[in-house]
Amino acid sequence: MSFPRLAAPSFVRLFLVAGLGLLLAACAQRPVQEQVKPAAQAVVNQGEPNQPKSEATAAPPPAPKPELPNQELTEAVLYEYLLAEIAGQRGSIGLSAQAYADLAKRTRDPRIAKRAAEVALYARMPNAAIEAARIWYETESSSMQALQTLTSLLINSKRHDEALPYLQKLFVADGGNAGDGFLQLSRLLANSQDKALTLKLVQQLAQPYPELAQARFAVAQAAIAAGQSELALAEVRAASRLKPDWDLPALLEAQLLQRQSNALALKRLAAFLERYPKAREVRMSYARVLVAERKHAEARAEFQALSKEFPDNIDVVFAVGVLSLQLEDYALAEANFKRLLLLPYRDKNTARLYLGQIAEEQKNYPEALRWYDEVAGGEQYLKAQIRHALVLGKQGKLDAARAHLRQLEVNGDQARVQLLLTEAQLLRDANQLREAFDLIGKALQGMPDQPELLYDYAMLAEKLERIDLLETNLKKLISLQPGHAHAYNALGYSLADRNLRLPEAQGLLEKALQLAPDDPFIIDSMGWLMYRMGKHRQALEYLRKAYAARPDPEIAAHLGEVLWVAGERREAEQIWVDAVKKTPGNDALNSTIKRFKP
């Protein structure tokens, strides 16, 4: 919601044309039966959500029109309305919200109460918004939007006990279908900050429905958000027992199991597919986990089955294209993304971006540039232009790449930061570290608290052995963003790699793992720290886990070194050989191999 600043004559015209439409509709001196004209009714219904219609049932009859109060357009009512609108136009949002709240109490008109709730929410006055929404719902009890608004406001204000009866009403508001109500809960509760309280609320709602699969599924979702994985697993399995052919519980259970191992997730998905082989989303998830488990032949078989069963399904074609790209099956990936260009796929620029990436991965740089240049506008435009510059850099055309970035016209600091970081990456790739360091340092003078610039500057300082600047900038970044896992990781790893202040490094890496427990690079850092501390068994546990999640050349270098030192030389050599085949030019990997096999 915005309140444009208007000069007095313009405001008067706007008020006469639009504002009086709401006020006169609310205050028309006619019998109730005659006052609801189409224009006024449009105001009442504005923003009402469309209820989903079941394919098996006819559309429900329209909700009865609310009986609107027959307001008298008195001087006091007109004054308060003008006060609210003019205050909003002049930026006094708090005064506008209070005036609207008072007017809603005076008139008890649902349209004015709705406006009061909106303005109070914009003004960050939650109590006023709740009271206005309560009047809105009390005076228009047939409005699902009013009920949803009031419920959401109460939940976000942690007034869960007050929200409970309204949530229960949501379940019976649409023909008594409690199942649909539970399925909408996660969206309705998404903004709730206290996840433990939210879980308790959902459990209270689900208690009367122990045999309803959707209720158990909703509890599982809330349990995941609250960090209670065991409860989530128990509830989602209960949902599956109650409704065995429902794919959502199977998918959610597989996601939970995948935290333990890919093998457990695959077993659950395979069992579902054995009974319901045409479950499209489950089969796509099964293919994704096969890719994660590096079972490439089986994954390709699943892609073929999906493509054969759903040749024109856009979701399937897109998923097969992305997963094929991950498997480096460039021919299949290219075929699927080109097919998307022929299908009614709305985001064709994304397909073009992927086609450029496929050509780039195969070092077909002219073709890559052609695809990137075909991304004309939209959300993918900046990404395509950045890839265009990086391709020029790969061709050794550093000056042309930098010039390409600098001629781009972008809006906003974030976009400009992305261009700066890309230019620094070009310089880094060309081994011009000092120039990249100076470029980011100069940018930081104008944006001293920009997180991405601070991080990149610290990484460049590390390459130049400026450990003082590395530490200063990472500590500043941590103070600005205490949840920045990679800042803790970078500082902890840098200390560990230099055998400096290892207990401090351990604290930093433990914090990084707490924030991002599944990040393979952070797991690798902890493994490297264990190695530096002489704890080879623990080091191998971390490093094997990191390498299994992401076979990166630097992780391979670390794992190979620890295996070699631990006497497992054959395994170390095999890991190094496999890594060199994939990334023959990696400096960290090659230097590690030379130290042990000169």
Image: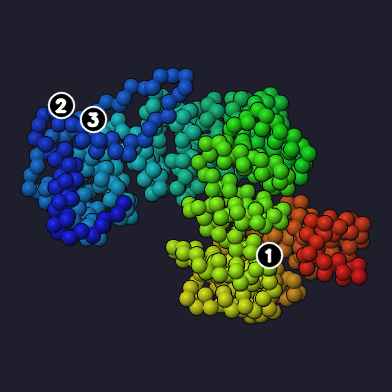
The x, y position of residue 413, in whole percent, is 46, 66
At x 21% / y 49%, what residue is drawn?
Answer: 100
Counting every numbered tag in the picture gives 3
Q: Nearer the viewer, residue 592 or 476?
A: 592
Q: State which quadrant residue 520 falls in.
A: bottom right
Q: State which quadrant residue 504 falls in.
A: bottom right
Secondary structure beneath dot 2 equals helix
Distance, label 1 to label 3, CA atoms, is: 68 Å
Placement of 135 over or under 393, stated as above or below: above
Q: Nearer the viewer, residue 403 or 350?
A: 403
Which circle's residue, 2 or 3, is located before the other in the chain? 2
> For the residues carrying marks 1 and 3, which lies nearer the camera in this image?
1
At x 61% / y 36%, what residue is drawn?
Answer: 316
At x 60% / y 69%, what residue is drawn?
Answer: 400
Q: Which residue is mark 3?
A: 66
Q: Nearer the viewer, residue 178 or 20?
A: 20
Q: Are marks 2 and 3 in contact (CB under 8 Å)?
A: no
Numbered label attached to residue 395: 1
Which circle's residue, 1 or 3, is located before the other in the chain? 3
The x, y position of residue 538, in whole percent, is 79, 59
Is residue 166 shown left or right of residue 567? left
Amino acid type at image mark 3: Pro
Which circle's residue, 2 or 1, is located before the other in the chain? 2
Distance, label 2 to label 1, CA atoms, is: 75 Å
> For the residues carrying marks 2 and 1, which lies nearer the camera in this image?
1
